[in-house]
Image: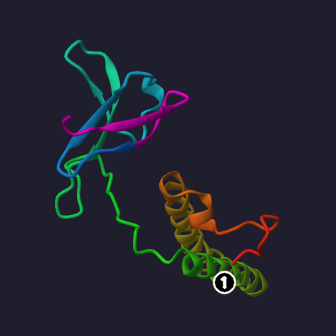
Amino acid sequence: MGQTVQITVSGGVVQHVEAPPGIMVVVRDYDVDERDCEGIDIRRDENNDLYQRMQFGAICDGKTSDAGIVSVDLSGVDWIMLRKQKEALVALSLFTLKACSILGIVNGGESAIEGVLGLLDHVQDQAVEILGEEAVFGKTPGQGEADQ
C-alpha cells in the first residue's frame, strides 16, 4: 500500500489533515460566499467557480508555499510547564489590566498578553486533536487525582 493522506472533516469544515512528509494536500472548499472572503485564500477554478483554497503539508524551511499554514512538532512540549506558564500569563494580564485601569493608561500591554494567550489556546486545541485532552490539560478534578 502507498502513502496515505488522512483528512478529517466535520460539519463541512476541514478539522485536521495528516500527510506524510513532502506531500502537499490542497483542499478546495466550494461552500464559500464572496462576501465572506476577507482574510482567506479565495480563488476561481477552471470553470470560474469560487472556492477557498487550503494547503497542508509540503513545508520547506518552516514555510508553506502560499497558504500561511505552518506545521509545528509539539512532541517535545512539556504540557505541565506550559499550563503553569499560561496561568502565570493570565495572572499577569489581569494585573496589567487592573494597574492600567488604576493609572488611567489605555492599552498598556494587556492586548499583547491576550494575543499570546490566544496563540497558546490555539496550540493546545490543536494538540488535543492529536494527543488527547488528558495529555495536554492533565487529569481533571474528579478523575481520581488532583489537576497537575
Image vertical order of residue 74 relative to residue 46, above or below: below
- Closest to the observer, 78 or 57: 78
Q: Which residue is mark 1?
A: 92
- Whether the magenta-drawn stretch holds residue 3 is answered as yes
Residue placed at 64% from the left, 83% from the top?
88
Residue placed at 46% from the left, 23% from the top?
33
Location of residue 2 in the rendering, given as x and y in whole percent from the top left corner: 18, 36
- Closest to the observer, 35 or 82: 82
Residue placed at 17% from the left, 50% from the top?
22
The chosen color scheme is rainbow
For residue 46, what is the image quadrant? top left
Location of residue 107 in the rendering, given as x and y in whole percent from the top left corner: 62, 74
- Closest to the observer, 21 or 51: 21
Question: Horizontally, is 19 left or right of 121 in the view?
Answer: left
Question: Horizontally, is 2 left or right of 71 in the view?
Answer: left
Question: Horizontally, is 147 left or right of 138 in the view?
Answer: right
Image vertical order of residue 89 relative to residue 74, above or below: below
Image vertical order of residue 123 relative to residue 6, above or below: below
